[in-house]
Image (cartoon, rainbow, N blue to C red):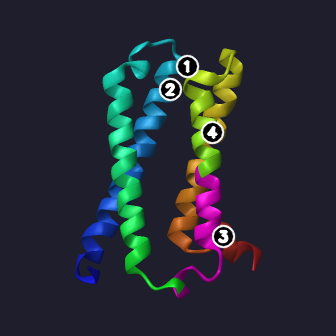
């Protein structure tokens, strides 16, 4: 399966960026009071993208050697993923006030950015690693 690594990696990256962009759009429109972000088709599209993203991630996890993950960057990324999902859930529907949804939305976007930089740098501190070293 290693021969498919480049395709799987590019699919994972594209799906991650698509997922983040769809969340950013849905969150901004939900904060603006639009109803379409909660429509079933939009939610199912998001679920489909996220399922494909996680599938590609699991494929990459099985293809690559474990030593690649020795410095903890993957654990940091997965921990932040849980935080991102929870914040996103509150930003889109669970928070009771508009202000709380807005705070959760901004925090979720910041968390997504942190996940992105960790993935790019392959370091738990992301792009901050060179500055703090």
Magenta range is 67-81
**Who is closer to the viewer here, 65 or 114?**
65
Which marked residue is nearer to the observer: mark 1 or mark 4?
4
In the figure, 122 relative to 99: above or below?
below
Name the quadrant containing residue 102: top right
Q: Residue at x 45, y 28 (%)?
A: 26
Name the quadrant containing residue 42: top left
Q: In the shown orientation, is residue 115 left or right of residue 20?
A: right
Q: Earlier in the sequence, mark 4 or mark 2?
A: 2
Q: Secondary structure at mark 2?
A: helix
**Residue 99, percent from left and from top:** 70, 20
Q: Secondary structure at mark 3?
A: loop
In the figure, 132 relative to 104: above or below?
below
Residue 72 lies in the magenta-colored region: yes
Residue 62 lies in the magenta-colored region: no
CA distance for labels 3 and 2: 29 Å
Q: Earlier in the sequence, mark 3 or mark 4?
A: 4
Q: Which mark is residue 28?
A: 2
In the figure, 73 relative to 12: above or below?
below
Determine which residue is flagged by label 3.
124
Is mark 1 in CB contact (under 8 Å) with mark 2? yes
CA distance for labels 1 and 2: 5 Å
Determine which residue is flagged by label 4.
86
Q: In the shown orientation, is residue 5 left or right of residue 115?
A: left
Mark 1 neighbour density, 10 Å: few (under 14) some (14–19) many (20 or more): some
Q: Residue at x 38, y 54 (%)?
A: 53
Determine which residue is flagged by label 1.
31
Q: In the shown orientation, is residue 28 left or right of residue 131?
A: left
CA distance for labels 1 and 3: 31 Å
CA distance for labels 1 and 4: 17 Å
């Amino acid at each position: 399966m290693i021969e498919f690594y480049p395709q799987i990696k590019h699919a994972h990256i594209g799906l991650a960026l698509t997922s983040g962009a769809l969340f950013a759009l849905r969150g901004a429109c939900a904060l603006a009071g639009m109803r379409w972000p909660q429509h079933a088709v939009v939610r199912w599209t998001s679920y489909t993208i996220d399922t494909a993203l996680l599938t590609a991630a699991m494929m990459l996890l099985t293809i690559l050697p474990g030593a690649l993950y020795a410095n903890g960057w993957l654990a940091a990324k997965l921990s932040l993923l849980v935080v991102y999902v929870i914040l996103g859930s509150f930003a889109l529907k669970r928070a009771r006030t508009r202000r709380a949804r807005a705070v959760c939305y901004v925090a979720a976007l910041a968390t997504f950015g942190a996940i992105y930089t960790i993935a790019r740098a392959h370091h738990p501190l992301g792009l901050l690693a060179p500055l703090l070293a």
